[in-house]
């Protein structure tokens, strides 16, 4: 996440915000933020949100995620907000939203649903 | 499933086929099979496929699913095929495909990815 | 939808609520509401919400949907709420949430993200 | 994509393979390939596969994607294979699979379903 230039901007029980300043190095040929960078920060926001509610503070792994890309991001700062919808003993379901912030204007650029698993509940043993 | 008129047509380790004869009662106003019926048989095909590989034959619950509807179904027989992609201790990931069969012609009407959990690994405890 | 016993309970620009009274005929062997019924009403709620914003009131088709099942529903009334996240010229992205209402208690039973296409923008031409 | 160190390894009508050599710079703290990098190459493989069938070779945009992460990748080369399931006038539905290749051993690390839109069919107009 730090390799992208992202940073944890806010954290509360079940909710996390990550900020990613737009950078040329993260853009595609057309100048838009690459989907991979956007998905990475949304996935991280969801994962950290899940961890705030995990017993014993154990880590989580992403089981699966689904995202709709709503508008291209091309400047400003991306804010990715992850929130826990349902925290279970084994699985935690989160949703995330990413907005592009330029001045005082926010554009909704992506939305995500993701399922996380507590790390000791290995999702894929042999 | 039986309420829809569906039946288990084939079963093998990690793979299941369910057949659903098209019926007026399952159609929307436009004459197409309702998405709910299609999703129900695909979900069942994935769930039964997962159960064929679950230790001790315990049941499974659907954690989540995602489907793309590729073409409308409006007659013939729907064949929903579920297959295990990855069987883990806790979670099983399946994919499913549904085709509409009319005579000797098959049309691919939907595709699904789904995550199942062994029932004793309760996804949503209080 | 009416075959399931569901009814449109509320409608506003970009938002729709559908109610489905729990019925034995919609339950699986374990007594829980079948995922197919839940997905059908959530898909309908999302589709109708999209239609409230479609130019000319043209119909919509479901391109794809993803749902997380958060808790089993086994009684009371299911309320499925669909809301438009982004209305475009061709595609509309919606999210939906379903709750089980028993007395004055609501349990969040499922969440959905779905993509709808205006019907004249045929998703799957030959 | 080139910023990740990925390259187009194979291309055919409706099918594309991208290779990504594992690199420390793409790993998380635990040494596993970051989900963002994996999702980026799978998304690109699906997008390029869609472009091979797009009339006039116009570009495509990702409408949405869903991925299941099946096993962690931690070395070797990642091969991300994208394939078109359904090519329509406006939308193209693809699936993708990523494997980690170490020597002659392949491990299935992720699977994806994605919906692409031809670029002139703008998904998100004002």
Image: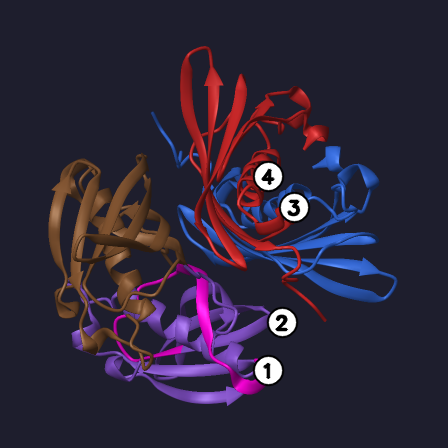
Chain colours: A red, B purple, C brown, D blue
Q: Earlier in the sequence, mark 1 or mark 2?
A: 1
Give me the residue at 64% from left, 41% from top: D36
The image position of residue D103, as x and y in percent, is 88, 62
Give me the residue at 48% from left, 67% from top: B122
Give me the residue at 39% from left, 37% from top: D121
Q: Residue furthest right?
A: D103
Work out whether residue D55 or residue D99 is closer to the camera in this orientation and state it: D99
Give me the residue at 51% from left, 82% from top: B58
Quickly name the residue at label 1.
B55
Specify whether D60 is left or right of B76. right
Marks 3 and 1, how far apart at CA: 29 Å
Marks 2 and 3, how far apart at CA: 22 Å
The answer to whether residue A74 of the structure is visible from this angle is no
Q: Secondary structure at mark 1?
A: helix
Quadrant of the image for the N terminus of chain A?
A: top right
Q: Residue furthest front?
A: A56
Q: Which residues are magenta?
A: B53-79
Q: Nearer the viewer, mark 3 or mark 1?
A: 1
Residue B126 position (above or below residue A113): below
Is residue B54 a member of the stretch shown in magenta? yes
The image position of residue C10, as x and y in percent, is 12, 46
Quickly name the residue at label 4.
A44
Q: Say which chain tag 1 marks.
A: B
The image position of residue A14, as x and y in percent, is 48, 40
Callouts 4 and 3 close, C-beta under 8 Å: no
């Amino acid at each position: 996440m730090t390799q992208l230039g992202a940073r944890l901007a806010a954290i509360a029980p079940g909710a996390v915000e990550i900020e990613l300043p737009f950078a040329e190095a993260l853009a595609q040929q057309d100048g838009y933020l690459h989907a991979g960078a956007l998905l990475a920060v949304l996935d991280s926001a969801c994962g950290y949100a899940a961890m705030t509610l995990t017993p014993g503070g154990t880590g989580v792994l992403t089981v699966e995620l689904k995202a709709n890309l709503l508008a291209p991001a091309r400047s400003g700062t991306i804010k990715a907000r992850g929130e826990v919808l349902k925290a279970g003993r084994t699985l935690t379901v989160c949703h995330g939203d990413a907005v592009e912030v330029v001045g005082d204007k926010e554009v909704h650029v992506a939305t995500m649903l993701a399922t996380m698993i507590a790390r000791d509940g290995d999702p894929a043993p042999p």
